[in-house]
Image (cartoon, helix red, strand yellow):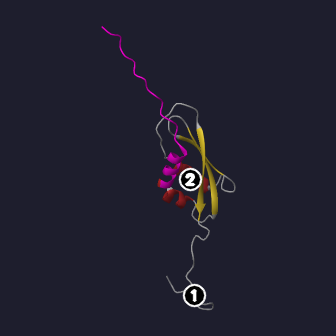
């Protein structure tokens, strides 16, 4: 009788930057809703732990500690990646908020706006 064979399993790799970027693109509509009304680039740091879960989400100033940060945190924490062997990893990405969130109806000066 031959000895039992032992299977060799390789640990799954940690998520790549491309994996995280793809996931963030899928969440774009929800992230955009979180930052509606803001302008410019909003830097986000998200820490993933080896279980595949997001353990921390932080926005850079001036959005740190604001309701926008709480909203982005809820959205990003909904992500789940395959587990891997290794240390937690922090990824940095940016949400680009539109420079002009809305354009009012154009009209000649002195003419009142039409009712909605």
- Residue drawn 58% across and 33% down? 87
Q: Please, is residue 38 above or below residue 59 in the view?
A: below
Q: Is residue 88 magenta?
A: no
Q: Is residue 77 visible?
A: no
Q: Is residue 52 visible?
A: yes
Distance in Å between CA atoms under marks 2 and 1? 36 Å
Residue that extends furthest to the front in the rendered view of this protein: 2
Point out residue 79 in the picture as x, y percentages from the top left corner: 49, 46
Residue 27 image label: none
Query: Crowding at label 1, few (<14), some or many (≥20) Cα neighbours within 10 Å?
Result: few
Which is nearer the N-term, disc 2 or disc 1? 2
Residue that extends furthest to the left in the rendered view of this protein: 1
Query: Residue 88's image quarter?
Result: top right
Q: Please, is residue 37 above or below residue 112 in the view?
A: above
- Residue drawn 59% across and 39% down? 89
Point out residue 110 in the picture as x, y percentages from the top left corner: 62, 92
Query: Crowding at label 2, few (<14), some or many (≥20) Cα neighbours within 10 Å?
Result: many
Residue that extends furthest to the right in the rendered view of this protein: 61
Task: Say which residue label 2 marks.
Answer: 72
Q: Classify mark 1: helix, strand or loop.
A: loop
Q: Is residue 8 magenta?
A: yes
Q: Quadrant of the N terminus?
A: top left
Point out residue 57 in the picture as x, y percentages from the top left corner: 59, 46
Say whether residue 107 is left or right of residue 6.
Answer: right
Point out residue 34 in the picture as x, y percentages from the top left corner: 55, 58
- Residue drawn 60% across and 42% down? 90
Pointer 2 with pointer 1, Cβ within 8 A: no
- Between 2 and 72, the residue placed more toward the observer is 2
Region in magenta: 1-25
Majority secondary structure of magenta residues = loop
Q: Classify mark 2: helix, strand or loop.
A: helix
Residue 107 image label: 1
């Amino acid at each position: 009788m031959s000895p039992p064979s032992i299977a060799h399993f390789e640990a799954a790799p940690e998520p790549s930057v491309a994996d995280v970027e793809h996931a963030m693109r899928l969440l774009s509509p929800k992230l955009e809703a979180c930052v509606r009304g803001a302008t410019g680039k909003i830097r986000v740091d998200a820490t993933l732990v080896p279980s595949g879960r997001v353990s921390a989400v932080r926005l850079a100033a001036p959005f740190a500690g604001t309701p926008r940060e709480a909203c982005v945190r809820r959205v990003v924490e909904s992500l789940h990646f395959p587990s891997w062997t290794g240390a937690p990893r922090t990824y940095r990405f940016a949400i680009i908020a539109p420079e002009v969130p809305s354009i009012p109806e154009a009209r000649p000066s002195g003419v009142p706006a039409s009712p909605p």
